[in-house]
Amino acid sequence: MDEVRVCVEKAFTLAQVDERLFSSFIEHLGRAIYTGIYEPGHPLADEQGFRTDVIDFVKDLRVPLIRYPGGNFLSGYRWMDGIGPKEKRPVRLDVAWKTLEPNEIGIGEFYDWTRKVGSKVMGSVNMGTGTVQDAADFFEYCNYPGGTYLSDLRRQNGHDAPFDIRTWCIGNEMDGHWQICHLDAADYGKKALETIKMLKWIDPQSEAVVCGSSSGLMKSFPEWDRIVLEHTYEKADFISLHRYYENFDNDDDFLASFVELGTYIKAAIATADYVKALKRSAKTMYLSLDEWNVWYQRRQEPHDWQKAPSILEDHYSLLDALVVGGLGLTLLNNANRVKIACLAQLVNVIAPIFTKEGGSAIRQTIYYPFRDISLHGRGVVLTPVVHGPKKETKYGDCPLVETAVIHDEEGKTVTVFCLNTGKNDLVEFTLDMRSFGKLRMSFWTCLTGKDLSAENTFEKPNAVNPRNMPVEKTAASTFSITLPPLSWNVMKFAIVS
């Protein structure tokens, strides 16, 4: 049996977790909105046509921000198409995803939906076909109280109070050749700077996220980020990162995806800090990983122009859930610089929640590790000292057991997350937490199983589900726990003395 020993010292603090680390994303793409969150005529639809079963699932995740309306969709979006009487809204070609967009849902309806699920909107503006003036008009419509043409138009459309959208993405993946009106770094940096100036003149309390590289695999990374930040450093608040992973027939490397994500984050931090030094600035640039997930891009299939086609609908396995758990640990362990992260996406499209048109909704396997870090990852991240074996992967050395530790001083708890990447053997996992005095384990949940390909389906919605593990009730300072192979574990301890 392998052994892993973890020493948790109360004083080894990394950062207070920003709750926006547990955010998500909904784009006008596939069935994310239509038959996802919105399906008038569904037996469980509310008075606005929103599915209440989906609302309940999202509420359980405690998602603080939801990025909207895109995504690739954003770079061709005309926001005024989505306001006013629905019967007068135009149907448009969405060239980004080759679909028909009916504009039945716009910013007003989406704002209403986020209030129902207990979230806020993370806004985004079109830096492709859109102009700086288009973006400024959108800011004014959303956030200015009243007395101007656009703010009064919002009030006429049923929202007397401003939407109070405080965090804004200035475009999407503008480094990508696939993006509508793709720009080079200098041109984007100039346009983004002028857009942020307009944003903060209209609403000084707002924050801006500029586009970093759409992947650490881009040949232009990190040079794109450097150039963009040289233009925007003193005005922007965050630079974005996007990263997706898929299994290329090697489970060991796939399970080590969190190692590569950590390397990518560290490179983005180094780039931002170089620009800080170059500018002689006292300001620290924070990161927004506003797209991350497992995404099987090889499975995408062509489709004709239609409304809400079934595209990018990955069905997730137990193995995928373990990988998402590991990525979540990397987010927590970089919480000193990563302040926003959006699981992409939330419903139907590469999502933890999946719906059947006219039917039920289910939680996919990845729902559970994301829910775990959202519910139990709030507090101060500690940096433990870990002694244990590692294995070699294409992403570098991967620890047999990856961990993250959260101290909730107000709640007087310590939460330990751990991913056992070992395939065959049990792991003797020893936790030394003597700096906290005596603790008592309050719960331990474990997501594991013999079949890594197992999925949740409409016929078997709970095929993959965390189970409660037996806990030792005796108060102690050191705990020895046997971890099942290939398992995602959440352990909470109450500080009793």
Image: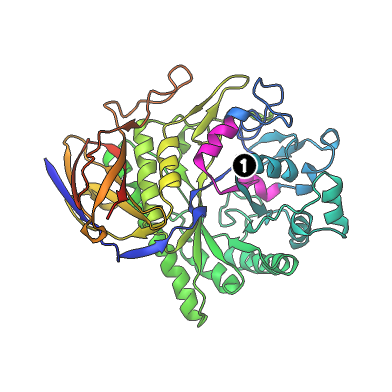
- Which residue is drawn at the image coordinates 34% and 34% (left, top)? 319
* Residue drawn at the location 28% of the way across and 37% of the way down: 487
**Outermost residue toward the bottom?**
280
Q: Is residue 489 visible?
A: no
Q: Is residue 29 found left or right of 85 in the rendered image? A: left
x then y, percent, for residue 55: 60, 34
Can residue 105 be seen in the rendering of this structure?
A: yes
Mark 1 element type: loop
Position of 111 with respect to 11 (left or right) is: right
**Left-right relation of 139 to 434:** right
Q: Residue 79: image x %, image y %?
A: 75, 48
Classify the position of the C terminus by image quarter.
Answer: bottom left
Q: Position of residue 436 (x, y in %)?
A: 26, 58
Three-letter amino acid code at disc 1? Glu
- Residue extent of the magenta highlight: 54-76
Above or below for 125 versus 26: below
